[in-house]
Amino acid sequence: MSNSLNTFHRLQENLNQIVLGQERLIERLLIVLLADGHLLVEGAPGLAKTRAIKALGEKIDGEFHRIQFTPDLLPADVTGTEIYRPQDGSFHFQAGPVFHNLVLADEINRAPAKVQSALLEAMGERQVTVGAETYPLPDLFLVMATQNPIEQEGTYPLPEAQLDRFLLHVLIDYPSVENELEIMRLVRSEALSQLNNANGKKFTISAVNREKTSIQKITAEDIFAARNEVLKTYMSPEIERYLVEIIAATRTPERYSDELARLLTWGASPRASLALDRCARARAWLRERDFVTPEDLQDLTGDVLRHRIIESYEAEADGITPDDIISKILALVPVP
């Protein structure tokens, strides 16, 4: 086992101790970090979406910033703006929170379209343009966004172009009864720890059971070294063709069945193939394999395609979800 893999296994174990019952979300967070992409997490309130992302931010040796998206947020509140200096009559650029290494966009669908579009250039091009100047973002840059599927009043659905910028769209569900009991005990321990913290230090999620959950922070160099190993993970030509066939099935569904063609209006772009390729390699690497299997692709296809395909009106009327369509695609495309 390489040093990079050992480091990420320790990180995964620590995050699973902090965020109980969400092992799949933690794995997806690490996959996105290894694949150099961005993550959209959707789930009901109180399912530890923000906690998981904040915990990851505490474990990485970089600058972390949370942006709470609201209807009155302005693009300059995200990207930054030029400030006038009367002393010398010049303008000075004041960088916004998007210039941090890890950015948590909390409840991203509560901000209007112009604010969401401000993130589009940052996520796609790794740069921000203000006025006539363009400013590069850090080499380590990751946007992790959350949204709530229940409350739709006062929300602004993300445009397709921005949804496509997210490597994965992860849906999370309620924890089991056993996990919920553990969560109650953990939160109670955290509350006691916070009350008994008499030395005035800032409370962090990792403060409870520090000997169990504390690890040395992962540096940007550690992450880049791990990404280099992930890119070297082997994918056979047969698996590569299987990957492309899955994505192509969303664009030409009539090749597989008339029923599938009836359910789809719009398929996924080649960006979906690139995302599935990077994520499958990262999943295989995290699971201590130096090669990709069909199971890696099948496990990630839902998260890669969920936000990239558009179902037909007939599918919506019949109550068929994008996940149902993706399951049909995986059943129809031959496995090598």
Image (tube, helix red, strand yellow):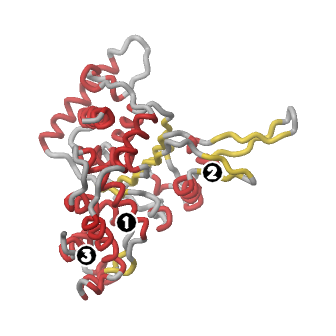
Disc ID at residue 225: none
Residue position marked by numbered label 1 in the rendering: 273
Give the residue displayed 23% in from the left and 38% down from the top. 20
The percent coordinates of residue 211 (x first, y second) are 26, 19
Badge 2, how many Cα within 10 Å: few under 14, some, many 20+?
many
Question: Relative to residue 293, is residue 159 drawn left or right?
Answer: right
Identify the secondary structure beneath mark 3.
Answer: loop
Residue 111 lies, in percent from the top left, at: 52, 55
Residue at image x 34%, y 21%?
194
Question: Which residue is located at x 30 percent, y 20 percent?
Answer: 193
- In the picture, the disc for residue 319 is 3
Q: Which mark is residue 128?
A: 2
Q: Tag 2: residue type?
A: Val
- Up the image or down, 281 lies above or below 15; here it is below
91, 331: nearer the viewer: 331
**Amino acid at dot 3:** Gly
